[in-house]
Image (cartoon, helix red, strand yellow):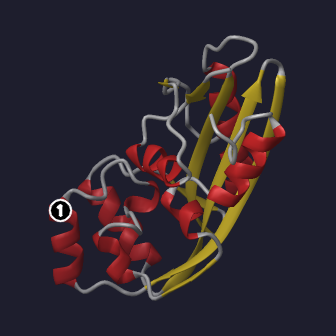
Amino acid sequence: MRLILGSGSPRRKELLAQLGIVPDAILPPDIDEDPKKAEQPRPYCARLAREKALAVAAAPDDIVLTADTTVALGRRILGKPRDAGEAAEFLTALGGRRHQVITAVAVRKGDRIWARESVSAVKMKRLSDAELNAYLASMEWQGKAGGYAIQGAAGAFIPWISGSFTGIVGLPLAETTALLEAAGYPVWTQR
């Protein structure tokens, strides 16, 4: 039995390492991540995690772990910003408001898929021009849903969360552990 991480995210690999888990292979799938017309954030996120799990080539007894993280401001999905201008737009919209960070996790073994979502509430402070410009110049926003990473410098902008810190980072460990165990992966025993 091999564990395949269907994600190129170094953060997901680091979070698994906190559990002592090292994937046997890392195979990020290439899927279309555009939301469907009128798709809500939570179903969108769950759909992407499942589609990623199905897109990873694996042997029948391999376990495939995939995830998707989405930042939702009401019904609006804030994905990975295309450029600094869109990152600034996202961060300005999030400033002074609560939003949701949804991370959907899917585990596949053969034809069977187990899936869960972690939904956390996050409040970001209003950013001054100096804070916004310095953060944009850091380039840390690149490749991050909503244009920020709580585990980086943007952690200074987050005075309050309710939910899973690891879910906000990109892989909720409680949910992930339960899914891996359901699929028969020996999380807490000698591998």
> Helix, strand or loop at disc 1?
helix
Residue 60, image x, y percentages: 75, 12
Residue 115, image x, y percentages: 78, 43
Can you say which quadrant of the picture contains the C terminus? Answer: top right
Q: Nearer the viewer, residue 106 or 109?
A: 109
The answer to whether 181 is drawn above or below residue 164 in the figure is above
> Can residue 38 be seen?
no
**Residue 89, quarter of the rendered image:** bottom left
Mark 1: give few (<14), some (14-19) or many (20+) Cα within 10 Å. Answer: few
**Residue 86, quarter of the rendered image:** bottom left
Q: Which residue is mark 1?
A: 138
Q: Nearer the viewer, residue 106 or 93?
A: 106
The answer to whether residue 111 is left or right of residue 158 is right
Residue 124, image x, y percentages: 45, 81
The answer to whether residue 24 is left or right of residue 75 is left
User: Residue at the spot x=55%, y=63% of the render?
Assistant: 166
The answer to whether 179 is drawn above or below residue 136 in the figure is above
Residue 38, image x, y percentages: 71, 49
User: Residue at the spot x=30%, y=51% of the render?
Assistant: 142
Q: Amino acid at mark 1?
A: Ser
User: Residue at the spot x=44%, y=74% of the render?
Assistant: 93
The answer to whether 78 is drawn above or below residue 154 in the figure is above
> Can residue 98 be seen?
yes
Figure label count: 1
